[in-house]
Image: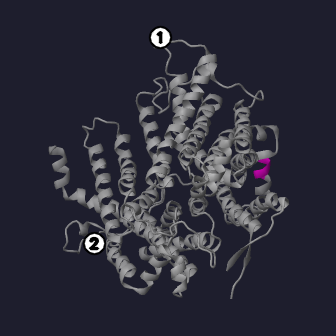
């Protein structure tokens, strides 16, 4: 018990929570945008891998860090455009298209990495984002600017969704595309924009791993974070504020299991602690499922003139 | 852009669509070969040769195809009923672990059973382990509306960590020099070789027979009819008197069992023990194979052999010209997307508006 108090009273723990939460916040907002427009995007896991890789590669090649983040966002947009073409343009299964994109983006990234660094055993490193130690706010000043960006993005996405005509159109195509179309909103264009924007955030979520949390690209470094974002969106009932809360809660347990694992007197095999995040995600899905208010048109393809 | 349904689709188009899509993928993937600085023609020739160019190549390809056909069948059964089982990877490991628990852990505890009893028990345990793993997500989907894609995906991570814990602890082989590796199966439970001097084992017969059985279930049984009805439109099926929940449960059990058997057959035919790297993502590749086959159980055999050949050929090719083996994964994933589009074009025509 004292152990737990020790952990919780240590600022380093809360620094870790916020750091672990950052890619989840970005990724969850990305999924949220897509789903609010009525499209599931299971490409997230692969898009995060691709963003982590291309962002890092750009910086390794000499680009400034923020350009690296931009490259990662652009990578996400390209895959988002492909997903939009398949699911909005051709009305193919959103599940299968997303999984296909995850497989493709992951394979392309690994291929690109191996072509760029054929005989390298230790991954080459870059100088990642520095902490914002000039900031007079504790805990936050141990984070990098990308975390601040993610935190500021939450109200920004909320504002766009609930306070702008664009957000209204986006929510409308996710709830009732027929009605949106009759109001002169283009379902295809709105959904495509939402997927592309959401996928850009997914790419940036990946780049946080290589440009801020670590300083190199590793295989399997995304390790299911994308799927957890998909679960978090359900947990958050498709609301940006709750998405932030969910990501923080999740990161809290993840950081806690890390500490418990390291505290030495762990009685259980370390793998059981590592399972916690995945078990929590499933638990969250089950608990929230009953009252979950899915966007009504989620996963329903829309074809003009068809009912 | 809008889609118009075609009035009829020719049988030839249905068969040619996936072939054309894969050919298209190979052409586009040539850009990656050029990026890697290798000659395109020679690279592809080596890839085909490595996968299909000799008796040895065929034996390796068929060996690799065995788990792929089984996970492909698992995906086919589930996807037909629109149960998106992405958990075949975890189910495969659960099956492998169950097989070793029955066929390798009992020695010394007093009960000695004839392999004639033990072998069916081992396969049954693997099938049950895989089936139970999918039952939860299927019921959660059916009763609570929890998306099964996310739950089955997350369960994969949980199972792999569980396997890792067991291989470090209770199931660790004490003679494995510290490697996280399970105890081995009793040697009399291992599957025989199909071709002497190669690695192809009789698991291939299992895989092919199961494909035929699944095909027969779809074609000739009430369950098969119910599965297709639920997959086409669950609400209409329920209205027409199809027992939806029971069908979903049966689909989950069947799909999970097939993936579980993939693990057991891999252990009994190839590795004889469980390690964490015994599957390089067979569960996920199975999804691609099911889609390439157009969810046709017999097509799964062909698609499984094709994908296995690409994966095996890439290894040989990579050693010769240095193009990373990941190109095989790119080709497989891109083929999936291309086949989806090609199949759609056999059913719809795209008309540009404005």
Are the residues under marks 1 and 2 on the same chain? no
**Image spot of residue A30 (x, y percent):** 44, 70
Q: Identify the secondary structure beneath mark 2.
A: loop
**Image spot of residue A177 (x, y percent):** 53, 77
The stretch of residues the image draws in magenta is B46-50
The residue nearer to you, when weighing B224 against A46, is B224
**Image spot of residue B324 (x, y percent):** 64, 55
Residue B110: mark: 1
- Residue at horizontal 57%, vertical 46%? B243
Q: Identify the secondary structure beneath mark 1.
A: loop
- Residue at horizontal 74%, vertical 47%? B309
Residue B68 in sight: no
Secondary structure mostly seen in magenta is helix
Residue of label 2? A132
Residue B343 in sight: yes
In the image, is A52 to the left or to the right of A14?
A: right
Up-down relation of residue A58 to residue A235 (above or below): below
Q: CA distance from mark 1 to mark 2?
A: 65 Å
């Amino acid at each position: 018990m004292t152990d737990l108090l020790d952990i919780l009273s240590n600022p380093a723990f809360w620094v870790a929570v916020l750091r672990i939460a950052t890619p989840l916040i970005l990724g969850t907002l990305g999924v949220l945008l897509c789903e609010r427009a009525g499209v599931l995007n299971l490409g997230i896991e692969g898009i995060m891998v691709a963003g982590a890789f291309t962002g890092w590669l750009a910086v390794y090649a000499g680009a400034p860090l923020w350009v690296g983040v931009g490259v990662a966002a652009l990578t996400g947009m390209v895959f988002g455009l492909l997903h939009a073409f398949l699911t909005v343009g051709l009305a193919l299964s959103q599940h299968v298209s997303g999984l296909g994109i995850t497989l493709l983006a992951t394979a392309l990234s690994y291929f690109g990495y191996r072509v760029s660094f054929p005989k390298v055993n230790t991954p080459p490193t870059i100088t990642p984002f520095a902490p914002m130690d000039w900031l007079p706010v504790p805990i936050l000043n141990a984070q990098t600017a990308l975390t601040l960006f993610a935190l500021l993005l939450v109200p920004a996405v909320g504002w766009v969704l609930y306070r702008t005509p664009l957000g209204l159109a986006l929510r409308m195509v996710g709830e009732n595309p027929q009605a949106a179309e009759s109001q002169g909103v283009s379902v295809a264009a709105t959904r495509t924009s939402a997927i592309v924007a959401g996928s850009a955030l997914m790419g940036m979520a990946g780049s946080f791993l290589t440009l801020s949390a670590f300083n190199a690209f590793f295989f399997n470094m995304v390790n299911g974070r994308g799927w957890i974002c998909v679960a978090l969106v359900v947990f958050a009932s498709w609301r940006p504020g709750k998405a932030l809360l969910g990501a923080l809660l999740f990161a809290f347990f993840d950081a806690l299991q890390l500490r418990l694992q390291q505290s030495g007197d762990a009685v259980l095999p370390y793998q059981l602690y590592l399972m916690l995040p995945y078990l929590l995600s499933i638990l969250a899905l089950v608990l929230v499922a009953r009252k979950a208010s899915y966007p009504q048109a989620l996963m329903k393809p829309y074809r003009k003139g068809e009912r | 852009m809008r889609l118009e349904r075609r009035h009829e689709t020719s049988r030839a188009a249905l068969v040619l669509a996936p072939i054309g899509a894969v050919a298209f993928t190979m052409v586009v993937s040539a850009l990656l070969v050029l990026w890697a600085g290798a000659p395109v023609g020679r690279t592809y020739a080596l890839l085909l040769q490595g996968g299909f160019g000799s008796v040895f190549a065929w034996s390796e390809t068929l060996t690799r195809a065995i788990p792929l056909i089984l996970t492909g069948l698992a995906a086919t059964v589930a996807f037909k009923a629109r149960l998106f089982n992405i958990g075949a990877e975890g189910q495969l490991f659960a099956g492998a672990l169950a097989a070793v628990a029955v066929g390798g852990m009992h020695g010394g505890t007093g009960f000695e059973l004839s392999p004639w009893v033990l072998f069916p028990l081992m396969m049954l345990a693997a099938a049950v382990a895989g089936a139970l793993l999918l039952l939860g997500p299927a019921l959660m989907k059916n009763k609570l509306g929890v998306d099964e894609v996310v739950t089955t995906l997350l369960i994969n991570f949980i199972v792999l960590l569980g396997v890792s814990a067991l291989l470090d602890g209770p199931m660790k082989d004490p003679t494995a020099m510290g490697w996280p590796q399970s105890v081995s199966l009793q040697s009399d439970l291992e599957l025989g070789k199909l071709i002497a001097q190669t690695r192809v084992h009789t698991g291939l017969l299992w895989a092919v027979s199961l494909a035929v059985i699944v095909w027969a279930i779809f074609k000739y049984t009430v369950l098969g009819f119910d599965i297709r009805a639920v997959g086409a439109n669950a609400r209409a099926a329920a209205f027409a008197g199809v027992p939806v929940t029971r069908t979903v449960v049966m689909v989950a059990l069947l799909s999970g069992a097939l993936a579980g058997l993939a693990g057991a057959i891999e252990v009994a035919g190839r590795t004889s023990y469980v390690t964490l790297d015994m599957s390089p993502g067979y569960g996920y590749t199975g999804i691609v194979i099911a889609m390439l086959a157009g969810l046709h159980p017999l097509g799964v055999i062909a698609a499984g052999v094709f994908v296995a050949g690409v994966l095996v050929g890439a290894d040989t090719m990579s050693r010769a010209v240095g193009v990373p083996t990941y190109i095989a994964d790119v080709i497989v994933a891109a083929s999936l997307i291309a086949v989806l589009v090609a199949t759609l074009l056999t059913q719809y025509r795209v008309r540009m508006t404005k």
